[in-house]
Image (tube, grey):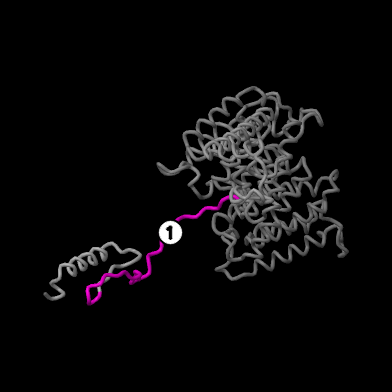
């Protein structure tokens, strides 16, 4: 019987096949003679490494606990138990809640302190008013958009943006910043503060207190808000333009106080401020007119200067007439100084911007009527105010200013091409009919000669008239009233 048919051999092969399915350390073998033996099981491939695990660091103390002789091993104490309790009892959610609670307490404290500060200071320019609610509503963003997402400039006489203004209002009135993220919450906070501030505190304010508050404002926005709050309260007994019957020193001139603050803002921003300040003065004038109050001579003078800066003779005429209603130009030395500034500014426009000053057509006519008047309307003019100063023997201290103003007026006539008016002025000066212009030149009959400044002004005006006909002003043929 062959080896392959030997039952013992077949049994051994079956055992080897079974071992192939479950490998062990030793493998069973049979030689050619049928002898059974075992050999070391050699792996055909290296065993697979164990799957990777996330390792963690064990405290050195735990590693040495079994080593009794180690210097790092010591008996356990109560402090170890307390420390372990503190470490294993930490709760991140509880920690976050405590942090939120602390922030809420801080916000509540700041809110209460700012609210009390605003309530106790009725002259704060940042106290909320009903107009702030209307302003925020008019500037509302699109639906489903938080108010803070809106960007852009406020369409008013201010350079602040809407978000920054709202931040300032909330900060000064004790409204939490989170309210800015929800319009309904912001409206609720606004109404709550307005109801809190409703009292008769504003009616108890004196003119001196109001004047000091106006002087302390550091921005046009703050000045505008304070005046608006004052007028909204409708207090009695404080006028912007004190009447002559008011005792000297008993009531400050609020018009002058506001003018000083406005001129300070003007100096801070020479290029942008004139139009913003004119807008502010125009709105204030309208509100005071509705109360049958006057803007005040000082603010009329400021309006005259600002209107000249923006080169608008119509607005200049408006403020000149308003100042004439309270006799500001004759009763105050500042009035003549403002007129001199007006004339010099218009001259500057003619000289520095001959093509872009915008004085054409009706604007030139309006400026000429402001200077010398119109035959259809009998009103006070720039010329009449200057002549009153020149012929007033009791105001010799203002003679240099009046002489310079008259010289600027004469040159302006030349720029406007008013040949008839210029000729009339030359005849008056030549005849010595203007008292303040006599005897200041060493030219023969000094009593019949104007001073040197006016003489140079006449020469410059005559030179300006010698222009091509197509460039001559349309006012040269006007039948003006020079009285």
Q: Is residue 448 magenta?
A: no
Residue bounds of the magenta highlight = 31-59
Q: Nearer the viewer, residue 416 or 51?
A: 51
**Residue 212 location (% of width, % of height):** 75, 35
Q: Is residue 53 magenta?
A: yes
Q: Residue at x 76, y 33 (%)?
A: 252
**What is the quadrant of the N terminus in the image?**
bottom left
Residue 144 at least partly seen: yes
Q: Nearer the viewer, residue 369 or 317?
A: 317
How packed mark 1 is, by other alpha carbons closer than 10 Å (few <14, some 14-19, many 20 or more), is few
**Residue farthest to the left, as pictured:** 1
Q: Residue at x 76, y 31 (%)?
A: 208
**Residue 378 location (% of width, % of height):** 63, 43
Q: Which quadrant holds residue 427? A: bottom right
Which secondary structure lies at badge 1? Answer: loop
Q: Which quadrant holds residue 125? A: top right
Q: Which quadrant holds residue 479? A: bottom right
Residue holding disc 1: 52
């Amino acid at each position: 019987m062959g080896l392959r048919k030997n039952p013992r051999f077949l049994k051994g092969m079956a055992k080897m096949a079974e071992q192939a399915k479950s490998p062990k350390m030793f493998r069973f073998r049979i030689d050619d003679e049928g002898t059974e033996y075992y050999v070391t099981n050699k792996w055909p491939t290296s065993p697979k490494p164990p799957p990777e695990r996330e390792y963690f660091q064990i405290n050195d103390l735990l590693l040495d606990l079994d080593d009794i002789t180690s210097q790092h091993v010591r008996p356990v104490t109560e402090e170890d138990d307390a420390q372990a309790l503190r470490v294993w009892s930490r709760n991140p959610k509880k920690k976050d809640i405590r942090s939120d609670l602390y922030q809420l307490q801080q916000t509540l404290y700041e809110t209460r302190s700012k609210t009390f500060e605003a309530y106790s200071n009725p002259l704060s320019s940042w106290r909320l008013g009903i107009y702030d609610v209307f302003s925020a509503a008019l500037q509302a963003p699109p639906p489903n958009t938080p108010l803070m997402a809106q960007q852009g400039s406020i369409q008013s006489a201010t350079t602040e943006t809407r978000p920054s203004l709202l931040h300032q209002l909330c900060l000064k009135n004790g409204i939490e910043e989170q309210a800015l993220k929800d319009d309904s919450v912001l409206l609720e906070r606004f109404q709550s503060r307005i109801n809190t501030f409703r009292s008769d505190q504003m009616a108890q304010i004196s003119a001196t207190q109001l004047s000091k508050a106006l002087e302390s404002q550091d921005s046009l926005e703050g000045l505008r808000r304070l005046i608006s709050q004052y007028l909204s309260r409708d207090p009695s007994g404080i006028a912007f333009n004190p009447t002559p019957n008011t005792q000297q020193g008993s009531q400050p001139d609020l018009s002058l106080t506001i003018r000083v603050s406005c001129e300070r803002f003007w100096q801070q921003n020479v290029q942008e401020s004139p139009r913003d300040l004119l807008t502010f003065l125009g709105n204030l004038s309208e509100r005071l007119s509705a109360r049958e109050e006057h803007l005040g001579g000082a603010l009329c003078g400021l309006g005259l200067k600002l209107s000249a800066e923006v080169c608008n003779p119509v607005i200049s005429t408006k403020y000149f007439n308003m100042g004439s209603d309270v006799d500001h130009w004759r009763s105050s030395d500042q009035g003549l100084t403002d007129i001199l500034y007006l004339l010099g500014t218009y001259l500057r426009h003619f000289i520095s911007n001959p093509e872009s000053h915008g004085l054409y057509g009706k604007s030139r006519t309006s400026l000429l009527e402001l200077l010398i008047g119109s035959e259809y309307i009998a009103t006070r003019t720039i010329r009449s105010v200057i002549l009153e100063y020149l012929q007033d023997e009791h105001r010799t201290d203002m003679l240099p200013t009046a002489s310079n103003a008259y010289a600027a007026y004469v040159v302006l006539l030349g720029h406007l091409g008013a040949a008839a008016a210029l000729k009339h002025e030359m005849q008056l000066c030549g005849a010595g009919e203007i008292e303040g212009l006599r005897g200041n030149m060493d030219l023969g009959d000094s009593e019949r000669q104007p001073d040197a400044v006016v003489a140079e002004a006449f020469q410059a005006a005559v030179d300006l008239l010698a222009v091509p006909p197509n460039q001559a002003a349309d006012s040269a043929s006007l039948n003006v009233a020079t009285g």
